[in-house]
Image (cartoon, helix red, strand yellow):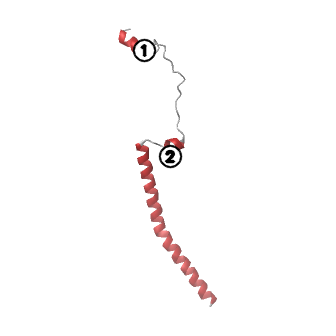
Amino acid sequence: MSHEAALHNHEDHGHDDHGHHEHHDTFLTKYVFSQDHKMIAKQFLITGMVWAVLGWFNERTIPLAIRLSRFKFSLVRIYLR
């Protein structure tokens, strides 16, 4: 074994794992409270798409609900005459 290989071999120096364990992220720490700029960009993109769908949905349903409530009110007025 060469001198450089012996210097870089951790087993020869007595280096162990020292009890290091893999850190497993939970859903909250990985996706909600992430500090990774790529995950934050994905959060921003998904949130924007959700708001766009909700805005489109409300644009269609709120006027329809108003029309239906007015139509129902007019039917009640006609029936009570």
Spatial CA span between label 2 and label 1: 40 Å
Please name the amino acid that badge 2 sits on: Val
Kindly indicate the quadrant of the structure image that contains residue 69.
bottom right
Q: Relative to residue 45, is residue 37 depicted above or below?
A: above
Please name the amino acid that badge 1 sits on: Asn
Q: In the rendered structure, are the residues bearing label 2 and label 1 in contact, judged by CB atoms less than 8 Å apart? A: no
Name the residue: 47% across, 43% down: 34
Kindly indicate the quadrant of the structure image that contains residue 68.
bottom right
In percent of width and height, residue 28 lies at 53, 44
In percent of width and height, residue 49 lies at 43, 56
Q: Could you tell me which quadrant the N terminus lies in?
A: top left
Most foreground residue, 40 or 54: 40
Label 2, secondary structure: give it.
helix
Q: Relative to residue 2, is residue 44 depicted above or below?
A: below
Q: Could you tell me which quadrant the C terminus lies in?
A: bottom right
In percent of width and height, residue 52 lies at 43, 60
**72 left or right, relative to 44:** right
Q: Relative to residue 28, is residue 23 depicted above or below?
A: above
The dot on residue 56 is: none
Name the residue: 41% across, 43% down: 37
Residue extending furthest toward the right: 80
Sort mark 1 into few (<14), some (14-19) or many (20+) by Cα contacts within 10 Å. Answer: few
Label 1, secondary structure: give it.
loop
Sort mark 2 into few (<14), some (14-19) or many (20+) by Cα contacts within 10 Å. Answer: few
Most foreground residue, 57 or 35: 35
Name the residue: 52% across, 25% down: 20
Identify the mark nearer the N-term, 2 or 1. 1
Q: Which residue is disc 2 drawn over?
A: 32
Name the residue: 45% across, 64% down: 55
Q: Which residue is disc 1 drawn over?
A: 9
